[in-house]
Amino acid sequence: MKLQSLVSLVETLRTECPWDRAQTLASLKSKIIEESYELVEAIDSHDEHAIKEEIGDVLFLGFFVAKIFEDEHSITLDTLVGDTVEKYRKKHPHVFEGKDLADKEAVLKYWHESKRDIFTGIPKMLPALMAAMIIQERAARLGFDWKSHVGALEKALEEIREVEASVGEDRLFEECGDLLFACVNVLRHLSVDPEDALKHANKKFIERFRKVLEALKERGKDLGDITLEEMDALWENLKEDGSQ
């Protein structure tokens, strides 16, 4: 079985390679984050070859981390796998125990009701926008939510006014956080992923700004040679031309 060959590869590397042998759970934290984001980026690219490669890297890293955990805590891979299988079987009683959960919303409701605290399990290392989305989704399942995006949007507009009123005051930092949280809530109601939306906006800004610089270069100018108004006019022209 190919999966066993991966396990054997990891065991060999942990024995024979000085670098692999020196790794610990702590030393691999940044690598785990890096590989996860590389997989996400590959998925966004819709590149089948890249996705396949990144899945392989994440799979390898998962077994590698499991081997380190086994070495450091004397817990076998079989035990880890067995515990994981049991955990996910318990999370799916509608599949393995005949429990009546008719749709995905019922499944999600069951999962969250089975937790003592609805906010348990939200990683502190999650990007803040993603964490805000999850927090709001969980609160909404208990009925703490606006009926539509209209209420959420009105709240966001209220938070903008709060930020404006707090400029120069100690509470500005807190009000800015409230504004971001409210904006995420608007996007959640509109079924827009805030991370993806902001990522797209970042990409669009970079590409358009590069076009501004290119246009200035063609005129023999740089940013220091024009006023902010002229730069804004050029920016708007590029927007009207449909530049991304």
Image: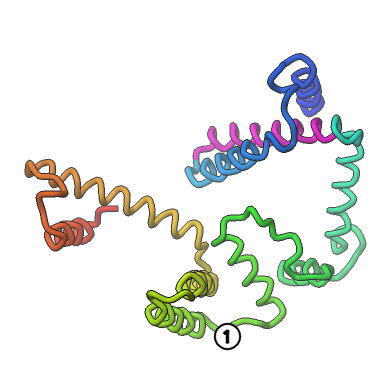
For the residue marked with disc 1, what is the amino acid? Lys
Residue 2 point in image, percent of width and height? 77, 25
**Residue 126 belongs to the span the image colors magenta:** no
The front one of 150 and 66 is 66
Residue 144 point in image, percent of width and height? 66, 82
Q: Given the current orientation, which residue lies at the most extreme top position?
A: 16
Residue that appears at 66% across and 77% down: 140
**Residue 63 belongs to the span the image colors magenta:** yes
The front one of 125 and 91 is 125
Q: Given the current orientation, which residue lies at the most extreme left position?
A: 219
Residue that appears at 50% across and 47% down: 44
Secondary-structure class at tag 1:
loop
Quadrant, the N terminus: top right
Density class for disc 1 (Cα within 10 Å; few <14, some 14-19, many ≥20) is few
Q: How many marks?
A: 1
Q: Is residue 18 left or right of residue 201?
A: right
Q: Is residue 216 left or right of residue 89?
A: left
Residue 162 point in image, percent of width and height? 43, 81
Residue 200 higher or lower than 137, as above or below: above
Residue that appears at 50% across and 43% down: 46
Q: Quadrant of residue 160?
A: bottom left
Residue under label 1, please give it.
147
Residue that appears at 51% across and 85% down: 151
Q: Is residue 90 left or right of residue 200?
A: right
Q: How is the image coloured?
A: rainbow
Residue 15 point in image, percent of width and height? 80, 17
Magenta residues?
Answer: 47-69
Q: Is residue 224 left or right of residue 81?
A: left
* Main SS class of the magenta portion in the image: helix
Residue 221 higher or lower than 107, as above or below: above
